[in-house]
């Protein structure tokens, strides 16, 4: 049975949600007085490509409305984890939120599709699929949960890293405690490999690696670098097991207060921030990789990725259950040919 983000870890997160909600409420009140800049949250630092993409969207909005519409991003997870801030966004305490697809999995089942392991063959395949009607359909599926899906951003491919040893086969992961985002799908993926999955927010990962609460995690090059996880977990294994996008959402409560012309401006500015983000993303991946190799990170390829794909395949059956999910999977697979 799926848990809602409110149910999952409710005891632990309730205080955080309330605190972040109160902070966001105060900020929203200040923002309203100063001409209502949209308040947005991001778990990454200010120079990360998701944050600068939303800054670019803000610049476009200011330019087109003579400063009437604007966005203020609270970066670096200041307002709380993605799961907690999403809840706040749903009830209108925050206007916008840039999150990964993972925390949305518990809210809307079709969002599990682009997060399936080994679904996209490449970043180009993901971009092609999400730039098509498939992407629009997935963004629109959020509306019934009081979120307006504005656009997808890149997140590259996720790879395993750990404190112990290089991973070559699923057997090398046996018994390892691997952190995953708060998503049942990710928990199942790790269990399917014979490892132990520990869901937690990104902000807790560094300390948990240091303390040995977890042995490893999985993420793209820029997150591995910007969170400094490489300092404690130097084995980075190129498993490329998930290529899932980031998502920029807006609270439907805030959206409904905008007139149609402003809604169009917001959608258009979000759309135009995507190519900006992609350019920065590609550069950021290269920069992070170069920096980490120079820092002595021990990177290894996997000779037979099909062993990982086969082990993780049962999660497809578990999570792809509705007719819509099955159709989306078929449509995405049909777009794989061009690489
Ligand atoms: C990053 C992503 C974040 C967050 C993080 C995580 O790649 O950009 O939004 O989801 O992964 O693993 O928690």
Image (cartoon, rainbow, N blue to C red):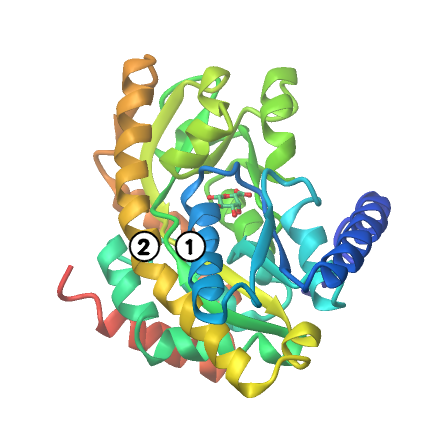
User: Which image quadrant for residue 251?
Assistant: bottom right
Q: Which mark is residue 14?
A: none
Disc 1 under 8 Å from ligand 1? The reply is no
93 with respect to 224 (left or right): right
- Work out which quarter of the rendered image holds the C terminus and state it: bottom left
- Disc 2 on helix, strand or loop? helix
231 w.r.t. 144: above or below: above
Residue 259 location (% of width, % of height): 60, 85
150 w.r.t. 212: above or below: below
Q: Which residue is mark 1?
A: 56
- Disc 1 on helix, strand or loop? helix
User: Which image quadrant for residue 297?
Assistant: top left
Mark 2 or 1, nearer chain start? 1
Q: Are marks 2 and 1 in contact (CB under 8 Å)?
A: yes
Q: For this rendering, which residue is in front, 214 or 41?
A: 41
Q: Which residue is mark 2?
A: 276
Q: For this rendering, which residue is in front, 319 or 77?
A: 77
223 w.r.t. 327: above or below: above
- Work out which quarter of the rendered image holds the N terminus and state it: bottom right
Mark 1 crowd level (few <14, some 14–19, many ≥20, 10 Å Cα): many
Residue 269 location (% of width, % of height): 42, 68
């Amino acid at each position: 049975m799926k848990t809602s983000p409110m149910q999952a870890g409710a005891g632990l997160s309730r205080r955080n949600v309330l605190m972040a909600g109160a902070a966001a409420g105060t900020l929203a009140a200040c923002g309203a007085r100063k001409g209502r800049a949209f308040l947005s949250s991001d778990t990454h630092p200010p120079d990360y490509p998701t944050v600068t993409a939303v800054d670019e969207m803000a610049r476009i909005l200011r330019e087109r409305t003579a400063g009437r519409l604007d966005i203020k991003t609270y970066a670096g997870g200041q307002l709380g984890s993605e799961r907690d801030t999403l809840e706040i966004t749903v009830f209108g305490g925050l206007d916008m939120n840039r999150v990964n697809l993972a925390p949305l999995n518990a809210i809307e089942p079709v969002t599990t599709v682009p997060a399936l392991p080994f679904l996209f063959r490449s970043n180009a395949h993901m971009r092609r699929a999400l730039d098509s009607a498939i992407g629009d359909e997935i963004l629109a599926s959020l509306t019934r949960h009081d979120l307006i899906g504005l656009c997808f951003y890149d997140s590259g491919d996720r790879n395993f890293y750990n404190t112990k040893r290089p991973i070559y086969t699923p057997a090398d992961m046996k018994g390892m405690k691997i952190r995953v985002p708060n998503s049942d799908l990710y928990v199942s993926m790790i269990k399917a490999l014979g490892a132990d999955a520990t869901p937690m927010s990104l902000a807790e990962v560094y300390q948990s690696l240091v303390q040995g609460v977890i042995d490893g995690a999985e993420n793209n090059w820029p997150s591995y670098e910007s969170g400094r996880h490489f300092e404690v977990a130097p084995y980075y294994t190129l498993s490329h097991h998930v290529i899932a996008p980031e998502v920029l959402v807006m609270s439907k409560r805030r959206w409904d207060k905008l007139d149609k012309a402003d809604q169009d401006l917001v959608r258009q500015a979000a759309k135009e921030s995507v190519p900006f983000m992609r350019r920065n993303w590609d550069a950021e991946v290269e920069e992070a990789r170069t920096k980490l190799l120079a820092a002595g990170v021990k990177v290894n390829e996997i000779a037979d990725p099909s062993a990982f794909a086969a082990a993780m395949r049962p999660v497809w059956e578990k999570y792809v259950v509705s007719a819509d999910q099955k159709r989306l999977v078929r449509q995405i697979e049909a777009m794989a040919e061009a690489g």
